[in-house]
Amino acid sequence: GSIGGHTATGDRRRRVLFFPLPYQGHINPMFQLAGLLHSRGFAVTVFHTDFNAPDKSRHPAYDFVPVPVVSDCLPPEGSSDAFQVTVQHILAVNRACEAPFRERLAALLSSSESEQQAQQEDDDVACLVADAHLLTLLDVARGLGVPTLVLRTGSAAGLRMFAAFPVLSDKGYQPAQESQLEAPVRELPPYRVRDLPSTTVAYHGVISEVISRIVTAVTTSSGVILNTMDALESGELASLRRDLGVPVFDIGPLHKLSPAASSTSSLLLQDRGCLEWLDAQAPASVLYVSFGSLASMSAAELVETAWGIANSGHPFLWVLRPGLVRGTPPSSSSSEAPAPVLPALPDGFDAATRGRGVVVRWAPQEEVLEHPAVGAFWTHCGWNSTLESVCAGVPIMARPCFGDQMGNARYVEDVWRTGLTLVDGEEIVRGKVEAAVAAVMGPGESGDGLRRRARELKSSAAECMAEDGSSWTSVDKLELMILNSAL
Ligand code: UDP
């Protein structure tokens, strides 16, 4: 249960500073964590970059500190190699934010100090919670005497794999050789070589650097917060607790633990009309298709995806994000950007699917997955999407693209057995899409087994969120640690 703490130090609240990595899949869990700590009585300050900036009007109780960055630091979208560009961009964000963050954090600390001397009632800064990708900024905060906690927005298994990455590279698993892709990673089951993040020699250096910075960010902090649950990853959490040398807080799923109002951190406008359309559909009849905010596909794959969905014969809700197809303009949230153009669907698709499907730019995904009409989720297996699907008890059709997505898909298929991988490292073709939809959504043993295990996993996940469940116990421990300055 909650210890409902308010103040450890008289009338002053403790203030927690947050700095999310400015991507949708990182902003959402950071705001959910902020909402959770705010509901426990902490004051909240959010540092943010000027691109992909949060909508302050949705969070009137928070303070916001903009950190202006130079203009060559734009978000990666619509590029031919989303992973390579994203990895470079993460390093650029660290560099670009370093000096302005130092200046703004120092200003915030000195103003709160002088107000305390003037005996005014104000909040004292307890710590900074930053994304695990922001090592440079964590170092800046520690340099100014601010204790740090890290939010790692991926799975426990993914973090364990990152910690093992240098060893796996020494053993020759990385960069991967084409002929070895199906081989098991003996040191780290259930991974196969193809599930590891770096598959080409050219990118191995920069990917190793980004991974090693994540591990350093975690091990030099006062603790790491993971958006996961004991029911999903008890062995992986135990192994991290043994090996990392810092406290590990399994506080997930954040989208369920956090008060609902604080989860509104979508950068794109969510089309809520599709919920009404779902209301009119039969239970478990709809295929929901979304590849998250960064993954991309070729124009040819878009055509195959469209016909695969059409030929499956199932009703569908498809998120066709601007920038999904390589070479089309991105969905930048900058107010000066021209209205993004949606990728064009193949001729004849509308006629073939009339009345059977809805295509939107961006959906209220959590609500969509919770809707009884949704029967399966075709996803890129980003960690947030994977967790949201698990909590809703929806079976998965996986098409992982990069980074930790292949590993997430491996757990879905081989460990939780709540879904199957459609294509991994190959081009999408319509025949495989049709076969996978039939296997996941159709009658028969395969679909029945997936649906049953998805329901079972949903109920074990619910136990972690019960009053004395593992996730709330970790929230209580985290709260005590911050309140008692045990950082
Ligand atoms: N999302 C959404 N609407 C959509 C698609 C995705 O609100 O149409 C949200 C989704 O609920 C999730 C996040 O965007 O919280 C995507 O994060 P994830 O880790 O799945 O993927 P990423 O975008 O980081 O690759």
Image (spheres, rainbow, N blue to C red):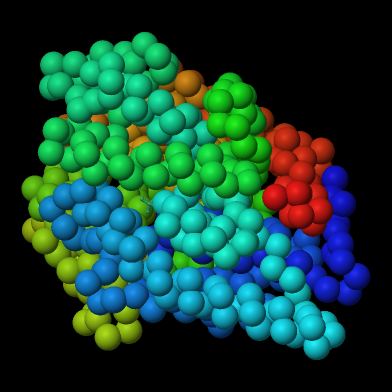
Near-viewer residue (217 or 279): 217
Q: Residue at x 66, y 83 (%)?
A: 111
For the point 13% across and 16% down, the residue is 179
Give percent across and percent down for residue 277.
Answer: 44, 61
Ligand 1 found in image quarter: bottom left
Q: Nearer the viewer, residue 407 or 296?
A: 407
| Quadrant hosting residue 123 | bottom right
Above or below residue 372? Residue 67 is below
Vertical order, 351 against 166 (above or below): below
- Report how many numbered discs are placed on residues in the image: 0
Where residue 377 appears, x then y in whole percent? 40, 42
Residue 472 or 277: which is nearer the viewer? 472
Image side of residue 276 versus residue 87, left or right = right
The quadrant in which the N terminus is found is top right
Image coords of residue 195 (percent x, y): 31, 28
Picture coordinates of residue 315 (x, y %)? 35, 48
Q: Give the residue displayed 28% in from the left and 16% down from the top.
A: 171
Residue 51 in sight here: yes
**Left or right: where 316 falls relative to 245:** left
For residue 233, above or below residue 141: above
Residue at 20 percent of width and 31 percent of height: 199
Visible residue check, residue 452:
no
